[in-house]
Amino acid sequence: MPPPPPPPPLGVTSLPHQCSVLLRRLAASRSLASSSCSSFLRALRCLHARLLTSALLHAPTHPHLTLRLIHLYTLSGDLPAAATLFRADPCPVAATSLVAAYAAAGRLPAAVSFFDAVPPGRRDTVLHNAVISAYARASHAAPAVAVFRSLLASGSLRPDDYSFTALLSAAGHLPNISVRHCAQLHCSVPKSGAGGALSVSNALIALYMKCESPEATRDARKVLDEMPDKDELTWTTMVVGYVRRGDVGAARSVFEEVDDKFDVVWNAMISGYVHSGMAVEAFELFRRMVLERVPLDEFTFTSVLSACANAGFFAHGKSVHGQIIRLQPNFVPEAALPVNNALVTFYSKCGNIAVARRIFDNMKSKDVVSWNTILSGYVESSCLDKAVEVFEKMPYKNELSWMVMVSGYVHGGFAEDALKLFNRMRAEDIKPCDYTYAGAISACGELGALKHGKQLHGHLVQLGFEGSNSAGNALITMYARCGAVKEAHLMFLVMPNIDSVSWNAMISALGQHGHGREALEHFDRMVAEGIYPDRISFLTVLTACNHSGLVDEGFRYFESMKRDFGIIPGEDHYTRLIDLLGRAGRIGEARDLIKTMPFEPTPSIWEAILSGCRTSGDMELGAHAADQLFKMIPQHDGTYILLSNTYSAAGRWVDAARVRKLMRDRGVKKEPGCSWIEAGNKVHVFVVGDTKHPEAHEVYKFLEIVGAKMRKLGYVPDTKFVLHDMEPHQKEHILFAHSERLAVGFGLLKLPPGATVTVLKNLRICDDCHAAIMFMSKAVGREIVVRDVRRFHHFKDGECSCGNYW
């Protein structure tokens, strides 16, 4: 028998031990982040080479060396190297590390493949837990349950606390999970002996809180009451669960039971108040948090700043900013970034965009959220020039950046620029989301570009966005604003999900096109189907009544706002009702209604009164309304024009001339009227007396021919609306050259025979043009649609859809 090998010399350790020590030190350096990723990986590969040359890799006598090496490779991010080492010896310990690493990297199929590579007989409970957790992380409940069942079916393995925690987390992603399913899983926990584990109880509470049934809330509460120990996750899960169910009161009750000062629970309660629109309660809780010296972090500040921004609490928000300045030196960059973004949002929403920009410029680090925040601030502040500057300087843009800018152009009245930007976005191979498409579609509606709008509708269907509510609602509005109310109604009928915005859009469309009764029927249907109307719903209904002369119905719905739905009428609701009374010649009732308003009359109220006086001929009240408007908005051209119209219609030429002189003396310029029409994939624009359009001469000749036919049918120019004291034939010539009449004539010339002629105008159509186009529709046998600043007019066979009421 050979003698045993001599022991190593004193002070000399074995190579395996040396490698083991080096691997431990490398792991410690990684956990302490004392080395960069590249230097860590370089050292790891050197150690890997040493193990390989020393024949210690996969050595049966030292398996821990290979396992630790695999684990370190998963920490370094070099997952392929770890996978290569694993395949040489697929053991469950190495598989567990790889499953966790690949799942964290979002590579679920690869993660599961390592589980499958281990023979069933060698799999342990820890490996099963890792795979169940991987499925839970990816929200794949059914496969997670299947792996759990395989764990139970193994015979030799038993689930532990981690097994049930992972399973319950995964079960929360089951569609329409019921209380019965939760109870079944709950019953299996104590049988396995895992009922006392804190993590399992927390997972049970989270599972119950995801069920819609009220019973589930009671069961979650029961689990909470039976828990011997609770941690911050326990309380946070209960608070967040109640908030998601809309029961903020119950969330606050649970919050008050917390003895320890868990800042996470305080943050959850403040966030719950913010998301529920309870800004006062959120700020009061924040103040209490400060008084009780609960630690404040970036989540606290972002939530309370959001509350102040949404509620317009400027002074409160500034005080929070002061606390942030005192604590900011203690913030790590990752914490400072979201707080600074919230500050930019706060100052932007409170109308102080200059301070918002100063904070943005002083930020040491910025991400795409930072850029989008200041971009949105400029857009919401109507500073489109500054918004464009920011947009062009952005180092990186995401879908939200483009969407904000497209929407900003639309809401700022620059629809053509919105479409140009949308086309640029697609040219740069950036795929627009449904919200960006909604903005582009809205731009088509503003421009009356029906063909372009239909093309975008086709793109939506191709991209699978036809179920999007934002895009669908934009399509309803676009079709309606382009004169295609039937297509708008069809879009409304085929939408898979209809919300209050959809109903409002459809009611508005019907009202604008003179279908007042149908609009009211849709409103009643909306209420009957359980959709609660908002202030916009009533605004659209009152507008529909206004365009159809439904005075009694308008009063009924106006009174119903507060009585039946608790909505207090605003300035815009009163304006619609007063305008409705004025158009119906009931100007006295309109004057009496003003006296009952809970606020002083605004410019829009006096403008409605002045418009009503033009209809009723009440010159005294009209002059008073104009005087009020001159005081409030002296540079607004509409007041002068409307008052001059009123005097001219009454034949008071001296007074009309006095108003026009006053307008000139004050330097007020009248917005020039223009009309446009889409023909031949191009939008053609006409102004009054237009001679610059290349086909203007041809249009004038055509209108002379049609004019002769119109006179035979009984058309007589109504020259009283020409605001000049001149010869009758001169007045007729001015009426003849109005922009809407030129655009209609162009459409009749250029569009295919029988096609509807749709013209859009930036101002209100004048009375004579309205009468002329009625005769024109009969003379040429064509349907003509005109959208002016107020509504749509559908002319057919000598009649208009407005019934001469607009």
Image (cartoon, rainbow, N blue to C red):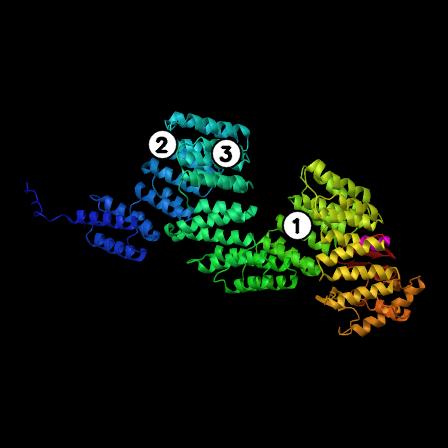
Residue 318 vs 723, above or below: the answer is above
Name the residue carrying label 2: 160
Among the 4 quarters of the image, the one containing residue 752: bottom right
Q: CA distance from mark 2 to mark 1?
A: 51 Å
The answer to whether residue 324 is seen in the rendering is yes
Q: Residues within 10 Å of mark 2 (few under 14, many from 20)?
A: some
Q: Is residue 50 left or right of residue 498?
A: left
Name the residue carrying label 3: 251
Residue 647 vs 75, above or below: the answer is below
Q: Earlier in the sequence, mark 2 or mark 1?
A: 2
Q: Secondary structure at mark 1?
A: helix
Name the residue at 87% across, 68% down: 725
The answer to whether residue 761 is seen in the rendering is no
Residue 666 at x, y = what percent?
73, 66
**Type of residue at label 2?**
Asp
Name the residue carrying label 1: 473
Q: Earlier in the sequence, mark 2 or mark 3?
A: 2
Q: How many marks?
A: 3
- Give the magenta part as a residue range: 610-617
Residue 404 at x, y = what percent?
57, 56
